[in-house]
Amino acid sequence: LIVGNDRPAPIPTALTAPFWEAAARSTLVRQVCGACGQNFFTPRLACPNCLSESWSWEESSGRGRIYSFTVCHRAPVPGFSVPYVLAIVELDEGWSMLTNLVDGEPSEIDIGTQVQVAWLSVADGQTLPVFRLAAAGQ
Ligand SMILES: [Zn+2]
């Protein structure tokens, strides 16, 4: 667990609370539609593919690849140490999330680089999913 106590903490809602509760157990989850099988994130009331409200939270492997990234040199709010990498990670189950890469030099990072979820502990006992470069063979 990486400590980032200065980072803003999430404010869970009725819809997002299961995501944050799983994150507190270092478990990454996403919604999966029970009607069409679509994986989706960020949390929604209905499947973005078929509008079904029959979905469930399912555990992710936490493994994926960088879909896109940028290096931020100016913090949007206090609590971010710059520079940091903002990335869209496409998870192996076929869904994606906007997140941060927490290690690796920008020169080591490219589109398609394999990454693995890691966990950042922030204020209020909450935990954020972030990503690091996957070790070779993982
Ligand atoms: Zn659906």
Image: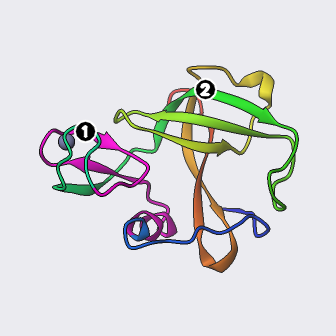
Q: Is residue 123 left or right of residue 71?
A: left
Ligand 1 under 8 Å from disc 1 Cβ: yes
Secondary structure category for the residue under label 1: loop
Question: What residue appears at the point 78 percent right and 28 percent down from the top-left corner?
Answer: 106
Q: Position of residue 88 (x, y in %)?
A: 57, 35
29 drawn magenta: yes
In this figure, which residue is indicated by the disc labeled 1?
38
Residue 79, image quadrant: bottom right
Marks 2/1: CA distance?
21 Å
Outermost left residue: 35
User: Of callouts 2 and 1, which one flags the residue occurring earlier in the amino acid sequence?
Assistant: 1
Question: What residue appears at the point 57 percent right and 28 percent down from the top-left corner?
Answer: 66
In this figure, which residue is indicated by the disc labeled 2?
68
Q: Position of residue 62 (x, y in %)?
A: 46, 44
Secondary structure category for the residue under label 2: strand
Residue 34 or residue 29, whichever sits in front = 34
Q: The N terminus appears in which quarter of the rendering?
A: bottom right
- Counting other residues with Cα less than 10 Å from the Cα at mark 2, is it few (<14), some (14-19), or many (20 or more)? some
- Counting other residues with Cα less than 10 Å from the Cα at mark 1, is it few (<14), some (14-19), or many (20 or more)? some
How is colour applied across the structure in the image? rainbow
Question: What residue appears at the point 49 percent right and 71 percent down from the top-left corner?
Answer: 12
Q: Where does the magenta region start and end? A: 18-45
Q: Is residue 65 left or right of residue 43?
A: right
Image quarter for ligand 1: top left
Question: Which amino acid, by three-letter code, is at mark 1?
Answer: Gln
Residue 52 or residue 130, whichever sits in front = 52
Q: Position of residue 114 (x, y in %)?
A: 55, 28
Residue 123, image quadrant: bottom right
Question: What residue appears at the point 80 percent right and 51 percent down from the top-left corner?
Answer: 76
Q: Position of residue 34 (x, y in %)?
A: 15, 49
